């Protein structure tokens, strides 16, 4: 089982983060190709695409804009569900499911964990 941590940035692009979006897009191509190559060995490959997650990566953007990470997240959050970001444990929970036997037939797919963001 291989799970690449991608982002919603790959699925919609993000202002000021084209380099980040491009690198995440590359992961999807890699995962899809590996899913094809490794299926014969019963190895599953997929990507997970979370919305913003409450991690230190948010500190840099906040510093550039002279705000706290939470202020930036709340100002820019477009999630349908009323949360500015996910907590790391939310992503861990999704990864635990994807790595379990309950998801044994999921491969070559993108698992979106976006609090409804991409529905806008």
Image (cartoon, rainbow, N blue to C red):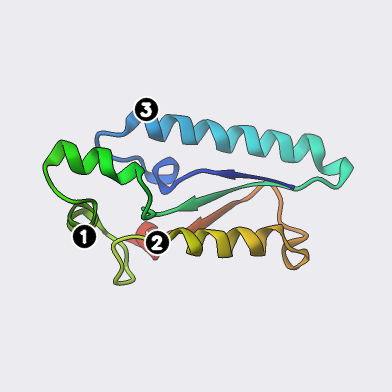
At x 38% / y 50%, what residue is drawn? 55
**Spot occupied by residue 56 in the image (x, y as percentages of width and height):** 35, 45
Q: Eyeballing the image, is 9 above or below 68?
A: above
The reply to whether callout 3 and callout 2 are in contact (CB within 8 Å) is: no
Q: Alpha-carbon neighbours of circle 2 within 10 Å: few (<14), some, or many (≥20)?
A: some
N-term-proximal mark, 2 vs 1: 1
**From mark 3 to mark 2, how far is it between C-alphas?**
22 Å
Q: Choose top left, top right, bottom left or bottom right for residue 50.
A: bottom left
Disc 1, SS: helix
The reply to whether callout 3 and callout 1 are in contact (CB within 8 Å) is: no
Identify the residue at the far left of this view. 66
Give the residue pinned by disc 3. Answer: 19
On-image quarter of the C terminus: bottom left
Q: Which mark is residue 82?
A: none
Disc 3, SS: helix
**Spot occupied by residue 14 in the image (x, y as percentages of width and height):** 31, 40
Question: Horizontally, is 20 left or right of 63 in the view?
Answer: right
N-term-proximal mark, 3 vs 1: 3
Give the residue pinned by disc 2. Answer: 86
Question: Horizontally, is 65 left or right of 86 in the view?
Answer: left
Q: Choose top left, top right, bottom left or bottom right for residue 21.
A: top left
Question: Horizontally, is 108 left or right of 104 in the view?
Answer: left
Q: Which mark is residue 74?
A: 1
Identify the residue at the far bottom of this view. 82
Q: Eyeballing the image, is 39 above or below 20?
A: below
């Amino acid at each position: 089982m291989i799970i690449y941590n991608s982002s919603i940035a790959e699925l919609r692009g993000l202002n000021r983060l084209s380099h980040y979006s491009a690198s995440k897009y590359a992961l999807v191509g890699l995962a899809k190709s590996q899913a094809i190559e490794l299926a014969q060995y019963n190895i599953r490959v997929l990507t997970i695409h979370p919305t913003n997650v409450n991690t230190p990566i948010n500190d840099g953007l906040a510093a550039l804009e002279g705000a706290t990470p939470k202020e930036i997240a709340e100002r820019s959050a477009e999630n349908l569900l009323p949360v500015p970001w996910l907590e790391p444990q939310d992503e861990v929970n999704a990864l635990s499911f994807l790595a379990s036997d309950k998801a044994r037939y999921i491969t070559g797919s993108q698992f979106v964990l976006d609090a409804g963001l991409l529905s806008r």
